[in-house]
Amino acid sequence: MRFMVIVKANRESEAGELPSEKMLAEMGKFNEELVKAGVMLAGEGLQPSSKGARVKFGRGKQTVVDGPFAETKELVAGFWLWQVKSREEAIEWLKRAPFEDTEVEIRQVFETPDFAASDPSGKLMKKEEELRKKIDAQRR
């Protein structure tokens, strides 16, 4: 099972403040543990929303809204993508993270078989698998 671990933004991350050297070292150690255990597939911090944009879709029209965005508690400051056996395992790993005064969300990622009922012929799933293979090949 794959899980997206979403680190919520706070006032400091939205101001573009980087973590302390101590926090970076602790997070580096935690990430090393995740990699060594075969859990971590990806993980990145995000620039503040002032450097981002949102695209709203509606009635055949797209509207671009430049950041920053007002509701800090609704924003994402970083993420991991983890491969674990269960939601409970993801939670146990997350409890070991060196965070303080931060909110982190865990969400299971849909896998191709989850869409089988919406694709009785299997054609869409086959195309999805082909795309994933192309993505993997491009990374190498």
Image (spheres, helix red, strand yellow):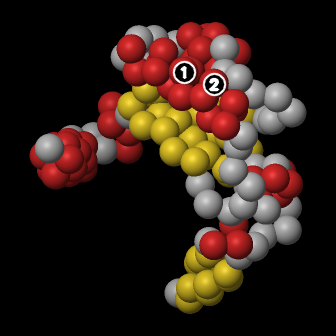
Task: Looking at the picture, tell me which residue is in the foreground, 122 or 126.
Answer: 126
From the image, tell me which residue sits under label 2: 26
**Residue 69, position in %: x, y?**
78, 70
Task: Looking at the picture, tell me which residue is in the foreground, 113 or 39.
Answer: 39
Residues at badges 2 and 1 in contact (C-beta under 8 Å)?
yes
User: Does dot 1 land on a helix, a strand or a loop?
Assistant: helix
Q: Which mark is residue 105?
A: none
**Residue 86, position in %: x, y?**
52, 13
Q: Give amino acid for label 2.
A: Glu
Vertically, is 106 above or below 125? above
Q: Where, by quadrant of the figure, is residue 39 drawn?
A: top left
Image side of residue 112 versus residue 132, left or right? right
Task: Looking at the picture, tell me which residue is in the foreground, 21 or 49.
Answer: 21
Quadrant occupied by the N terminus: top left
From the image, tell me which residue sits under label 1: 29
Q: Where, by quadrant of the figure, is residue 129 drawn?
A: top left
Q: Give amino acid for label 1.
A: Lys
